[in-house]
């Protein structure tokens, strides 16, 4: 049986729904003050349009929970790589702020996994 982490979602279908990146950009502007992160969000939106032909929109035929779960797993791998590469002894000696946020990420992964449709969980 294949893991839910390797489940392939269908290509997104366009809709008349709002663009999610625009909503996130507005949230970042409201809560974080905007700036570089807003520009990065819009750049990622453009990359998504190039890759998928449409911006990320709700009700696009994909399971948003599955997409989130898979992206969080990737984020955990990248974060652990960063922590390993930055540690002097290449062991579990990352700075405390990285360790704390890594644990938060792992907890978020566990939460999202619990929200996957039952047929996608082991």
Image (spheres, rainbow, N blue to C red):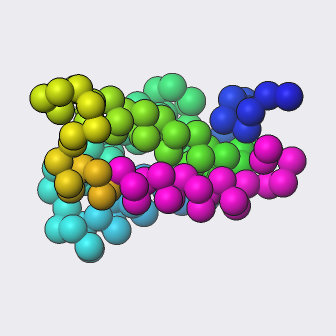
Which part of the image, by quadrant, shows the N terminus? top right
Q: Is residue 43 above or below residue 95?
A: above
Q: Position of residue 84 (x, y in %)?
A: 27, 30
Q: Position of residue 63 (x, y in %)?
A: 71, 48
Q: Position of residue 80 (x, y in %)?
A: 35, 36
Quadrant of the rendered structure where residue 52 is? top right
Relative to 74, 32 lies left or right: left
Q: Position of residue 29 (x, y in %)?
A: 24, 67
Quadrant of the rendered structure where residue 79 is? top left
Q: Residue at x 19, y 61 (%)?
A: 34
Q: Residue at x 32, y 45 (%)?
A: 42
Q: Nearer the viewer, residue 68 or 102?
A: 102
- Report if residue 118 lies within the magenta region: yes
- Report if residue 82 lies within the magenta region: no
Q: Overall secondary structure of the magenta stretch?
A: helix
Q: Nearer the viewer, residue 28 or 46?
A: 28
Farthest residue, direction bottom:
30
Q: Nearer the viewer, residue 102 or 66?
A: 102
Q: Nearer the viewer, residue 99 or 93?
A: 93
Task: Specify the segment rendered in magenta.
Answer: 102-122
Which part of the image, by quadrant, shows the C terminus? top right
Relative to 25, 36 lies left or right: left
Count of all numbered marks drawn on residues in the image? 0
Relative to 99, 56 lies left or right: right
Q: Residue at x 54, y 52 (%)?
A: 109
Q: Residue at x 59, y 56 (%)?
A: 110
């Amino acid at each position: 049986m294949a893991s839910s982490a390797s489940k392939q979602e269908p290509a997104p279908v366009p809709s008349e729904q709002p663009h999610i990146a625009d909503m996130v950009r507005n949230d970042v502007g409201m809560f974080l003050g905007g700036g570089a992160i807003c520009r990065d969000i819009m750049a990622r939106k453009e990359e998504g349009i190039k890759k998928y032909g449409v911006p990320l929109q709700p009700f696009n035929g994909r399971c948003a929970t599955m997409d989130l779960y898979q992206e969080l797993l990737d984020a955990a791998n990248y974060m652990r790589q960063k922590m390993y590469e930055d540690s002097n002894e290449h062991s579990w000696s990352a700075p405390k702020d990285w360790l704390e946020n890594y644990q938060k990420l792992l907890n978020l992964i566990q939460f999202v996994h619990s929200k996957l449709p039952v047929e996608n969980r082991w």
